[in-house]
Structure formats: structure tokens, C-alpha cells
Image (spheres, grey):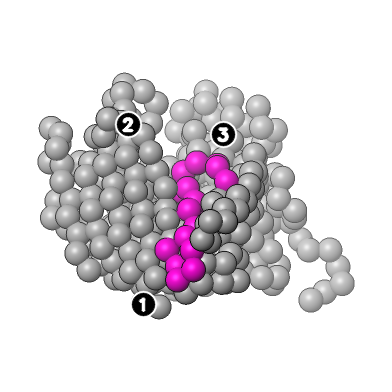
Amino acid sequence: MSSHAPRTIRWGIIGCGDVAEVKSGPAFQKAAHSTLVAVMRRDAARAEDYARRHGVPRWHTDANAILEAPDIDAVYIATLPDTHHDYALRAAAAGKAVYVEKPMAMHAGECDAMIAACARAGVPLWVGYYRRALPRFLAVRDLLREGAIGEVREVVSMQTQRPPDTRAPGAWRRDTARAGGGPFFEGAVHTLDILDFLFGPMEVVTSSASARGEDPRLEDLVDARYRFANGVSGYGHWDFAASADGEFNEIAGSHGRLRFSTTRDIPIECCRGDAREVVAIADPAHVHQPLIQTIVDEQHGVGHCPSTGRSAARTARMVDRMLATLR
């Protein structure tokens, strides 16, 4: 490593919409040795407004202005899933490092093509499964490594959610043509990915998916049993047409159990016999920031980003198998 200060990684965003407003966008400016140079959105007024409010030097309505810019090193693709594959291939061809939102693509085949394109171009590919770097989930990982609940034997994930107002913001999540699937495809992937992070690659044992609404492709009830490479078994139940909201993951061990939430910033519970320990770790204001910092650090040869194209493709492959009965 040189004694000189690390160079600043210069970012461009394609798709400065809702996810870039708080979760990710400001983090590119707040991470060490990182800066946001330009943003793009097809709606000129909204692109200009975002740039003005966030202090971004340039805004564009054409993605090529980001992809061809000589002063941009890496591109964050924050559009809907139906365009991730195309933009990732174009970014790779332009020699830009690629950071793409989740779900990574519409299906695992597109993920594989994105991985291959970035490999051919010699550019890195990362995916926005930011929980892999959040302190709350790192604490879960550390508790398991320390043997807090003994030998891990099973993990159970449960999520129920009332049907959303289709007129409300975020209704695109139920548009299978743009989102790639329904609420499970867009949301439950966070749980599947963090389980991959904690326990390693998984294989589906049995699964069923149902669509109870008007769209036969829009899954709203999914049950799956799976097994991890290390022998841990898992079960998941997701109901997105339920009467009440709820969500948790519970890991059972030989000496206790550990409960945590994927979607809610609530304390981790660790129970051993009659003893109950609560670990409260708040999420940062910009939840992508810890992961973005790992990307910048990796570019400087320090550490690595834990959410890669290959890890995200594993999650995509599991989702494809779980939804196979509807596809």
C-alpha cells in the first residue's frame, strides 16, 4: 500500500428515486474516500431536484451521460429490477465498477449474465444486500460464532403482511413485469440473503407458492424448507395477504435460541434457559453506508465487500426454485 492518501471513489447513480433518497444516496457522499459526482433520472425535473437538494454537481436524463463520464469510477444502478441486467452490462462494457440494487435481476439467468459480463470486463460487481454489513446483523453473526446458543440446529423465518393499497407509493412491487415477481420476490430476498450470509449456501428441499389474487404470477403465500451446506435446516413461511403484520427469524441451538428481525430495527433476543439477553443496536441513518464503505475499502485494497454478484445470484436461484410452481 502506498503512503499516500487513498484516492476518492467517484460515483454516478442511475435511477435517483425513492431508495436513493435516504437509504443509499447520501451514503456515497458520507462514506470515507467516496463522492457522488452525478445522478440520472429520465424525469428531468426530479433529477434536477434530487441533485439540488443533495448537493450533487451534475444531473442527467440519459444513462449514457453517467456510463461515458471519464470522472466516474463506479455506477450505482437503483432502477427497477427489469432494467438491472441491461444497465449492468452497459456499465461493465464502459469499464465502470457496478453496484446494483436488489433483487439483482429478474431471474438467476440474468444474474449469471451480469457476473460473466463484469468478469470479462475486469470490473467488480456488488449487490445492495446492505444487511450483510449492518452492525445489527454482524452482532447476530458474532453471537453465533461465539457459541451463544450452542450448536445451531434450525432456523425458522416467518413474515405476515396485510395487502397494501395498490395506489400507494411502492405499488410497483406488485407489478410482475417490472419487479420480476411480487412482494416475496422483492422483499423476502433480504431474509434469504442474510441467511446465506450467516449459514452459507442453501438448497431448497421442498417449496410451494400460491397466488390468491387476480394476477396468477403474483405470489402472496410461500412456504419452503431448505438445508444449508453446513447441515443446518431451515423453514420459511411468508404470507402477504394476512390479517396482521409480523416478522421474525428464530435460530434454535443446542443451548438456547436467538431471535432477530430482518425488516425491523428492534433488539436481538438471546435466550438460554431462563436467562434472556437483549442486544439493542440501532441501524444507521443511511442503511447502505456500511456496505458502501466496504466497497470503497475493497477498491483501496483493504478488506472486501460481503455482498457480491455471486452471493446475490445464489439468493436469486433459491427464489426461482421457490417460485417455480408459478413460473
Q: Position of residue 116 (x, y in %)?
A: 39, 71
Please tell me which of labels 1 and 3 falls first in the chain.
3
Q: Is residue 313 above or below residue 21?
A: below
Q: Amino acid at mark 1?
A: Gly
Q: Position of residue 23 (x, y in %)?
A: 56, 40
> For the residues marked 1 and 3, what is the alpha-carbon distance in whole angstroms?
40 Å
Please tell me which of labels 3 and 2 falls first in the chain.
3
Q: Is residue 267 above or below residue 235?
A: above
The 10 Å Cα crowd at callout 2, few under 14, some 14 to 19, many 20 or more, is: few
Q: Amino acid at mark 2?
A: Ala
Residue 257 drawn in magenta = yes
Labelled pair 3, 2 in contact (Cβ < 8 Å): no
The 10 Å Cα crowd at callout 3, few under 14, some 14 to 19, many 20 or more, is: some
Q: Which mark is residue 244?
A: 2
Labelled pair 2, 1 in contact (Cβ < 8 Å): no
Q: Residue at x 38, y 62 (%)?
A: 155
Q: Is residue 16 above or below residue 232?
A: above
Residue on which disc 3 sits: 21
Residue 272 drawn in magenta = no
Q: Position of residue 177 (x, y in %)?
A: 24, 41
Q: Which mark is residue 289?
A: none
Q: From where the camera sits, is residue 285 visible?
A: yes
Q: From where the camera sits, is residue 116 visible?
A: no
In terms of secondary structure, where does tag 3 sit? helix
Q: Nearer the viewer, residue 254 or 125?
A: 254
Magenta region: 252-267
In terms of secondary structure, where does tag 2 sit? loop
Residue on which disc 1 sits: 231
Q: Amino acid at mark 3?
A: Glu
Q: Residue at x 63, y 47 (%)?
A: 280
Q: Is residue 201 above or below residue 100?
A: below
